[in-house]
Amino acid sequence: MTIRSLLPSQVAAKLNSTSLLVGCGLSLFAIMTVLLSTTNPLSIGPNGILLFFLVLYLLGVVIALAAIKGWQALFGRSVPNLKSFYLASVTAFAPVMLLALNTLNQLQAIDAVLVVAFELLALFYIFRRIE
């Protein structure tokens, strides 16, 4: 099941991946803005904090996908859609890991280096194994 199958046929015909990406990004940004401006971590509770991290991750995926699509358009190189989604999801996980370490007061220079090493290793694996 895809998003296009849930939409009316007139809307689905006009919908392309760029407009869907921009729409998702703007709606996630609006959710993040509402979360940050109306709540605090003590009043929102653990489910709200989980929602914040989820929205942050999804916003990172949208930004990374937009960067990959821009890279493809700028340099004329084509990356399959599944591979670009894998790359974006791995890239978007780094800020979440760093923020989670920072909230636990565990973020040090070695931790940031380990997160970068993990990211590079995961990206290398995706580039080599996923077709």
Image: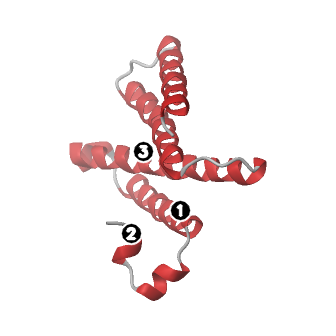
Residue at image position (46%, 65%) is: 27
Q: Nearer the viewer, residue 80 or 27?
A: 80
Residue that sits furthest to the left in the current view: 46
Which residue is tagged 2? 3
Q: Amino acid at mark 2?
A: Ile
Determine the residue positioned at 50% across, 11% down.
110
On the image, the x and y values in percent for residue 62 come to 51, 53
Q: Residues within 10 Å of mark 2 (few under 14, many from 20)?
A: few
Q: Earlier in the sequence, mark 2 or mark 1?
A: 2
Label 3 vs 2, first from the N-terminus: 2
Residue at 43% of width from left, 50% of height from top? 58
35 vs 50: above or below: below
Callout 3 environment at 10 Å: few (<14), some (14 to 19), or many (20+)? many
**Numbered badge on residue 21:** 1
Tell me how far mark 2 sits from mark 1, CA to CA. 12 Å
Going by the numbered disc 3, the residue's amino acid type is Tyr
What's the distance in space between the residues labelled 3 and 1, CA to CA? 15 Å
Any mark on residue 57, and which? 3
Amino acid carrying label 1: it is: Leu
Count of residue discs: 3
The local secondary structure at tag 3 comes to helix
Task: Give whichever of 23, 47 is nearer the camera.
Answer: 23
Indicate which disc, 3 or 1, sits on the residue closer to the N terminus. Answer: 1
Q: Nearer the viewer, residue 129 or 41?
A: 129
Q: Quadrant of residue 57?
A: top left
